[in-house]
Image (tube, rainbow, N blue to C red):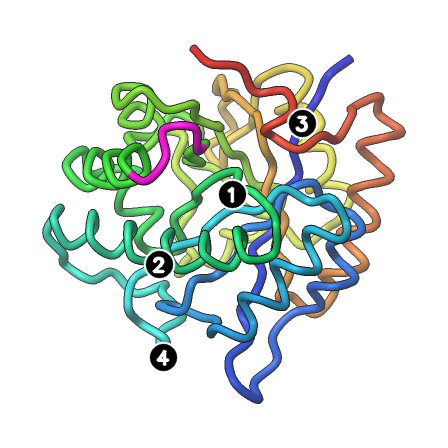
Amino acid sequence: MTVIDVNCDMGESFGTYVKGRDEEILDYITSANIACGYHAGDQTTMRKTVTMALEKGVGIGAHPGLPDLQGFGRRNIDIYPQDAYDLVVYQIGALNAFVKAEGGKLQHVKPHGALYNMAGKQKDLAEAIAEAVYKVDPELILFGLAGSELVRAGKKAGLRTASEVFSDRTYQKDGSLTSRKQPDALITDYEEAVSQVIRMAKEGKVKTLQQQDIKIDADTVCIHGDGENALEFASYISSALTDAGIEKKRIGEFLKSE
């Protein structure tokens, strides 16, 4: 049977500002990427999200981002590799403290937004992030865009890596995601989004905007929890994967070392 992890970005509320429907979406995913306070989230939100994830048996990951609350971590910031290393270590440490305090174990690390995209293409940033993760805990799994520099850097560092695909994003012929600045970056039709995921999981292929099929590894699929219909889509894709004979499991339960 085909197996895949379903992950979602969470813990993005801040103070009295509430973002997403985390508690309900946790029922439909297997791994949660929890914001660590730089691009979103705060200490109380981190604790609450960790507690909910543990109660529902969902794998917990740190979701470190650029220090950009106003831009939600989606604006590129020209940082040095050492900066990337430091901010990733700092944010993993913050979330890991809450996970340990609640009796859990951190499963993975997935960089957020612009940091994720920059590390996907910039080898020096990718290697700095991979080194940070490895030095904090070599048992952690590093999430990166399938085929990216981040995945390659993680393997080079000796980490287990999870090749990530996206249900609601379109792809370019080089395997990168279409920029959000373009009108055709997002897939809003549920059936189209799920069909793309099922094909990536079962066939290891995805059709690009240039109408070319390219190979792609799919260990984990990201669904976004902050959209208007996020909960509805989470329920829909969960059922559709089951109907397609695809088993949903926490990445740490089936991903083996290289």
Q: Residue at x 53, y 38 (%)?
A: 107
- Distance from disc 4 to disc 3, alpha carbons, whole Å, reads 33 Å
Mark before the other along the chain sequence, 4 or 3: 3
Q: Quick check: 208 left or right of 123?
A: right
Mark before the other along the chain sequence, 1 or 2: 2
Residue 106: numbered disc: 1
Rendering coords of residue 21 (x, y %): 71, 68
Residue 65: numbered disc: 2
Mark before the other along the chain sequence, 4 or 2: 2
Residue type indicated by callout 3: Ile
Local packing at callout 2 (Cα closer than 10 Å; few below 14, some 14-19, many 20+) is many
Identify which residue, 3 or 52, lies in the foreground. Answer: 52
- Distance from disc 3 to disc 2, alpha carbons, whole Å, reads 25 Å
For label 1, the SS is loop
> Which residue corresponds to mark 4?
70
Q: Mark 1 and mark 4 in contact? Answer it, CB < 8 Å.
A: no
Identify which residue, 174 or 18, lies in the foreground. Answer: 18
Q: Quick check: 130 left or right of 196?
A: left
Q: Quick check: 183 left or right of 122?
A: right
- Distance from disc 1 to disc 4, alpha carbons, whole Å, reads 27 Å
Q: Is residue 37 magenta?
A: no
Please tell me in which quadrant of the rendered image residue 6 appears. Answer: top right
Identify which residue, 231 or 101, lies in the foreground. Answer: 101
Please tell me in which quadrant of the rendered image residue 150 appears. Answer: top left
Q: Which residues are magenta?
A: 136-140
Characterize the magenta stretch by its predominant secondary structure.
loop
